[in-house]
């Protein structure tokens, strides 16, 4: 198996994986989207709420705040020595006490939450939570724990992830000389992968595989059957969008750690089963 990074920014990662089956590609996608533990608010205590929003709405907003996560320090509650009752190894606390002393409405943001661990804070300090009027006050205590997205979406490690086949196109432009329609495919391709600016014959753009969606419009509509569209076996292009709760390196390494654990668990289960011959 080989991996090639195509694009990497703060919140987006695109890479090519070669040498894996579609079953493994889908397993990687499912693990990333649902089984990587991340931190999120799970319990909220509203001590004072003068805002126009109900306590339940504020609690829901706090639960969906993306929080930076440290997997080296914190454990899932069910794996913690405290049994999940809440201790410094499996729980963090966030507090917010804001009083509006001005004569205009005041917006409370995620950055107004104070964490007992400076490493576990809202990813973006400018996420709106609630607005209060003059002389109003809000006092909140919130507690965050590690969890899995298969239990609740607030524990999802990424915003989105998908993979697609690696496109391949064979284009015999020598057949274009007799084409009665110059050039139909350059007009039909939704991604403009064929350049017909020279008005003699279309040219397939160099990095067509980055945009091709394998819609096969060019292959089906080419009057001279000069185009063949297919995909490269066991090669996939992954795209991941993150909200910043975990670095991409941690996400990938944790994915394969979980994958190997599942394989070992499956093998152990097979050894325990008596197979009838």
Image (tube, grey):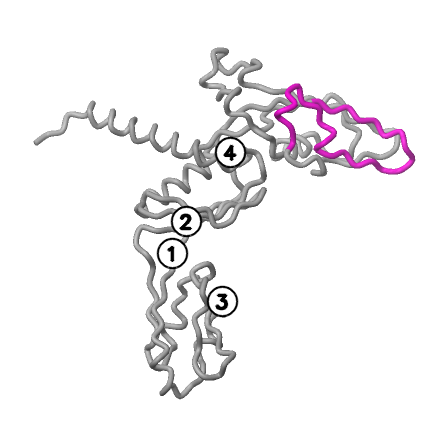
Q: Is residue 81 part of the magenta span, yes or no?
A: no
Q: Residue at x 29, y 27 (%)?
A: 264
Instruction: Check residue 49 in the rendering and tell me which mark sits there, or answer none.
Output: none
* Distance from the alpha carbon under mark 2 to that under mark 3: 20 Å
Check disc 3 and report the residue beneath it: 191
Q: Earlier in the sequence, mark 2 or mark 3?
A: 2
* Distance from the alpha carbon under mark 3 to that under mark 4: 37 Å
Instruction: Check residue 16 in the rendering and tell me which mark sits there, or answer none.
Output: 2
Check disc 4 and report the residue beneath it: 152
Question: On the picture, is 257 further left or further right than 42?
Answer: left
Magenta-drawn segment: 95-122
Which tag is nearer the camera, tag 4 or tag 2?
A: 2
Few, some or many residues within 10 Å of mark 1 (<14, 14–19, 20+): many
Instruction: Check residue 166 in the rendering and tell me which mark sits there, or answer none.
Output: 1
* Distance from the alpha carbon under mark 3 to that under mark 1: 15 Å
Name the element at disc 2.
strand
Q: Residue at x 56, y 28 (%)?
A: 69
Q: Quadrant of the N terminus?
A: top left
Which tag is nearer the camera, tag 2 or tag 3?
A: 2
Few, some or many residues within 10 Å of mark 2 (<14, 14–19, 20+): some
Q: Quadrant of residue 170?
A: bottom left
- In percent of width and height, residue 177 lies at 37, 85
Q: Residue at x 10, y 30 (%)?
A: 276
CB under 8 Å between callouts 1 and 2?
A: yes
Residue that protrudes farthest toward the left in the picture: 277
Q: Earlier in the sequence, mark 4 or mark 2?
A: 2
* Distance from the alpha carbon under mark 4 to that under mark 2: 29 Å
Q: Quadrant of the C terminus?
A: top left
Q: Earlier in the sequence, mark 1 or mark 2?
A: 2
Question: On the picture, is 267 further left or further right than 274?
Answer: right
């Amino acid at each position: 198996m080989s991996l090639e990074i195509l694009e990497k920014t703060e919140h987006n990662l695109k890479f090519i994986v070669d040498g894996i089956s579609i079953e493994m590609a889908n397993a990687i996608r499912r693990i990333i989207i649902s089984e990587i533990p991340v931190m999120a608010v799970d319990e909220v205590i509203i001590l004072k709420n003068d805002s126009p929003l109900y306590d339940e709405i504020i609690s829901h907003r706090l639960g969906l705040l993306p929080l930076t996560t440290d997997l080296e320090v914190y454990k899932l509650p069910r794996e913690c020595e405290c049994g999940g009752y809440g201790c410094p190894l499996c729980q963090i606390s966030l507090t917010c006490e804001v009083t509006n002393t001005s004569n205009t409405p005041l917006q409370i943001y995620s950055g107004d939450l104070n964490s007992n661990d400076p490493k576990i804070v809202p990813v973006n300090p400018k996420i709106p939570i609630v607005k209060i009027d003059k002389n109003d006050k809000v006092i909140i205590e919130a507690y965050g724990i590690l969890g899995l997205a298969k239990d609740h979406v607030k524990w999802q490690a990424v915003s989105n992830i998908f993979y697609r086949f690696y496109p391949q196109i064979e284009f015999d432009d020598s057949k274009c000389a007799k084409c009665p329609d110059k050039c139909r495919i350059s007009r039909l391709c939704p991604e403009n992968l064929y350049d017909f600016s020279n008005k003699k014959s279309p040219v397939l753009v160099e990095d067509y595989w980055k945009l091709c969606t394998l819609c096969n419009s060019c292959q089906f509509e080419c009057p001279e059957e000069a185009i063949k569209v297919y995909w490269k076996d066991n090669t996939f292009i992954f795209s991941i969008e993150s909200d910043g709760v975990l670095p991409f390196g941690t996400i990938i390494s944790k994915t394969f750690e979980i994958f190997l654990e599942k394989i070992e668990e499956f093998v152990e289960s097979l050894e325990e089963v008596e197979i009838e011959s």
